Image: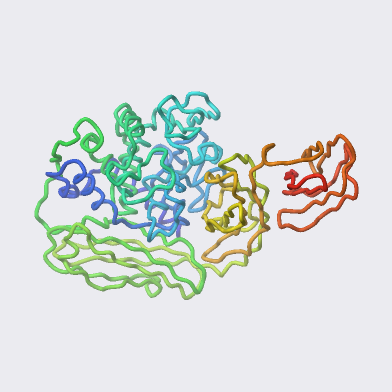
Amino acid sequence: MRKLYITLSLVLTTLVAVANAPAGYYKSLNGKSGQALKDAIFSLIRPHTAVYYSSLWYYFNSTDCMPDDPTRVWDMYSDIEYHFRGSSSVSGMNKEHSLPKSWWGGGDDITIYPSYTDLYHLYPSDAEANTAKLHWPLGEVSTIAFNNGVTKTGTPKTGQGGGAATVFEPDDRYKGDFARTYFYMATCYQDYTWKYTFMMSNNSADWKTLNEWSIALLLRWAREDPVSDKEKNRNEAVYRVQNNRNPFIDNPELIEYIWGDKQGQVYNGDGGEVTGEPELITPTQGTVLDFGEVALGKSLQYTVFIKGQNLTHDLSIQIYKNDYKMFSSNVTSIDRTIANSEEGYPLVITYTPTETGDHTAKLLISDGGLVGSIGVELIAKCDEPPMLTAINALPATEITDNSFIANWEPATQEIDYYLLNRTIYDKDNNIVLSESINVDAEETSYYIGDFAPDQTQTYTVQTSRLGYTSPESNVITVTATGVNDLFVNKPLAIIGMDGAILVKCSEPLGKARIFNANGQLVKEIKILENDAIIELPRGVYFMTTSTSNKAFKVIIK
């Protein structure tokens, strides 16, 4: 059943290629300039349907397929040929936030952070390229560290990067795509407080959201790489899912009015010929809401924004067909005044399955003076509750004075995502921060960029599936290391090897004790001698000796 709807979405995408926005969609922007214009765009595009993260591969089938081969993924990060597997993830690919989710703090509650699943900046990406990109800003590379022919990363050119050591440079054919993506994100989420400000600004007086160097870069990219049919088709496909549009694809001149050469000028764009007849702007005919999967005993909700113009009567809401009893709406009618407003009405659809299996229904919106009705397909799947087991967290790597990478072994069960739980302690062992971060199911590492030399961090990892979480993994402790952190009365060096540590000392030393990352004593050596090889399982260990007042840290791989 789910394959049938994927085919339907692909057909609809082909039929509406290079379509235009509905007549009157942008009328609220006319007569405005500067900050008022940007605020009007924000009000127009922000209330939109936020999809579920588990449904993204279903939607990618229609938003990111090649026009000459709808089964092939259009990857803007590599030229590797990947093919869709229905609504399942594609091996070797990630669901990539082109504007890194860590920039807003990684929040994943779509009722608070709809950016987490906003398809206007989420793209299917080659996993290797995504790993190289990490959370770095856009930019032009000076010295290359990674290059697959489409994605480059490396040190930034002078004046770029916003303080980042690395930048991500897409291929020339996609630079305009990413620029218009960032202009959209800087407008749709202009009310966010940004944790990382490589390209963004938290200055309350700076309504442009983007900082100056990034504006200059994105303007140039947008001008040099104009809107393509690919972007127009994708804009239309996402509109049918989220019920909002990227205005900078429909009307790229808006970029100039807000950030470019036409700043301060009043915008009076062509909003399209408005007939005066009652019509529904969102949702559109052919919209499909995929609730993804849910465990028996739980429920999921979607919010669909009902927006119309010139409606003469109240709208009627009905759910019918097939498994309609498992879906419900919060109202059966919508006041025409609310539906005609710029904000529209937030209609809540709830899926509460009573048995496992694939389920479908149809949302029908009618009356209001409309000719005919609008139908929205509802699809979902219910599974038995999962039985999740704990996974193994691995030692941190690439530890510097201000960053490290947390690692873990991949789950052996089907999961939706990982939960990275980390705690930061100050030098007096007081908790500074405790948080959980959602990490894509395809990834087994996460970059931490707020490490401080005088702090200690611990992390554990859990898996999540259908609202259930596994037990926590083992605890990994991370501390900054280096010569300056050690005080040794007698010369001593500890060298990590495969499955062991090698001791180098100028003379036999006294008792040594080795602890694991959980603080448990795993080995005691009565006399530590030169060239001693101490075998240990892989992990992070701390050694204390009678000749040192601090612990030595060693990683066994």
Residue 144 shown left or right of residue 205 in the figure: right
Determine whether, in the image, residue 470 is placed left or right of residue 63.
Answer: right
Q: Report if residue 15 is visible in the image.
A: no
Relative image position of residue 555 (x, y in whole percent): 73, 44
Q: Image height check: is 259 above or below 280? A: above
50 relative position to 464: left or right: left
Task: State the image coordinates of residue 59 (x, y, percent, origin top left).
Answer: 41, 51
Q: x%, y% of residue 498?
A: 79, 41
> What residue is rendered at 41% in x and 69% in y?
351
Q: What is the residue that sits farthest to the front in this orientation?
A: 489
Nearer to us in this view, 423 or 538: 423
Please provide percent x and percent y for residue 443. Answer: 57, 48
Residue at the spot 29% in from the left edge and 28% down from the top edge? 223
Residue at 54% across, 41% down: 127
Residue found at the very far left of the displayed protein: 276
Report the quarter where the N terminus lies: bottom left
Say which of 100 and 84 sits in front: 100
**Residue nearest the viewer, comparing 109 with 251:** 109
Q: Is residue 138 above or below residue 480?
A: above
Nearer the observer, 223 or 203: 203
Residue 538, relative to residue 164: is it above or below?
below
Is residue 475 at all visible to an observer of this figure? yes
Quarter of the figure that contains the C terminus: top right
Identify the image quadrant of residue 405.
top right
Snapshot colouring? rainbow
Residue at 38%, 69% in the rendered image = 350
Total number of numbered labels?
A: 0
